Image (cartoon, rainbow, N blue to C red):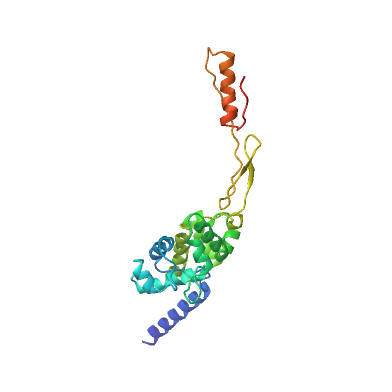
């Protein structure tokens, strides 16, 4: 009997030691990743609530499971909610069509800074690579680690990872003709584009007809107006 009790005590100590070695989770997580996805999809469609509560989640049909309170905790950790549950300015910015996903992306870059410092694109990394990253930079038992990864993947589904400081600025990008293309405020910069044009001219055309073809290419592709004679 004493031997069994000693073995049981030893097992408890080993479990406690393993838990301590695992450390505390460094990243936010919810035990209801699907509820988190539903909430993120609903936020842009709904009026901004004075406070995000379980009643809000139930009213929006996000979840009636009390464990979904962990979803609210995640939004607090990534800066969309204050600790009181009141929406932040980032929450309001996330609601805006077109730019909201990039705002969320910027918040995730801050929350998961160490992941982005150690991976070119953690948001598109395969699960095995994410497991390695999270095991190195976070803690927690098997369940906590799994939920951290699932939470991160759920969040990134609603985020785009561009520099939001560039949004709202005009950008000038030269096109193939050497002209500057001015982006409208609120749109991302246009990347440079290289065009390789291969022309197959029809046979049995007059010189004048060939000239007309070249002039149309100059006008409609390169934006150069050539006066026809």
Residue at 47%, 56% in the rendered image: 97
In which quadrant of the rendered image does the C terminus lie?
top right
118 or 97: nearer the viewer: 97
Number of numbered discs overlaid on the protein picture? 0
Look at the image and tell me in which quarter the N terminus lies. bottom left
Give above or below for 153 relative to 53: above
Q: Tell me where residue 153 appears, x and y as whole percent.
A: 46, 59
Would you place residue 158 above or below residue 8 in this image? above
Q: Residue at x 59, y 47 (%)?
A: 183
x and y, in percent, of residue 119 in the image: 57, 56
Residue 200: x percent and y percent?
54, 21
Q: Is residue 151 left or right of residue 108?
A: left
Residues 102 and 25: in front is 102
Residue for point 53% across, 67% down: 89
Residue situated in front as seen by the camera: 84 or 27: 84
Question: In screen coordinates, is 32 left or right of 22?
Answer: left
Vertical order, 79 against 13 (above or below): above
Q: In the picture shown, does residue 72 fall above or below 128?
A: below
| Residue 39 in which image quadrant | bottom left
């Amino acid at each position: 009997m004493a031997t069994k009790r000693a073995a049981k005590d030893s097992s408890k100590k080993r479990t406690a030691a393993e838990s301590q070695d695992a450390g505390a989770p460094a990243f936010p997580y919810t035990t209801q990743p699907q509820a988190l996805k539903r909430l993120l999809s609903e936020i842009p469609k709904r009026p901004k609530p004075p406070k995000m509560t379980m009643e809000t989640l139930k009213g929006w049909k996000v979840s009636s499971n009390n464990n979904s309170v962990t979803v609210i905790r995640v939004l607090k950790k990534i800066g969309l909610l204050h600790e009181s549950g009141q929406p932040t300015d980032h929450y309001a910015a996330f609601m805006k069509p077109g730019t909201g996903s990039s705002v969320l992306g910027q918040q995730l870059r801050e929350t998961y800074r160490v992941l982005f410092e150690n991976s070119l694109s953690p948001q598109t990394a395969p699960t095995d690579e994410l497991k390695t990253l999270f095991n190195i930079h976070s803690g927690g038992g098997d369940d906590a680690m799994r939920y951290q990864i699932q939470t991160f993947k759920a969040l990134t589904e609603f985020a785009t990872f561009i520099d939001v400081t560039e949004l709202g600025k005009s950008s000038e990008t030269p096109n193939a003709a050497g002209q500057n293309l001015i982006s409208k405020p609120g749109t991302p910069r246009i990347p440079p584009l290289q065009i390789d044009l291969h022309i197959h001219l029809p046979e049995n055309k007059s010189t004048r007809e060939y000239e007309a073809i070249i002039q149309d290419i100059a006008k409609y592709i390169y934006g150069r107006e050539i006066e026809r004679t």
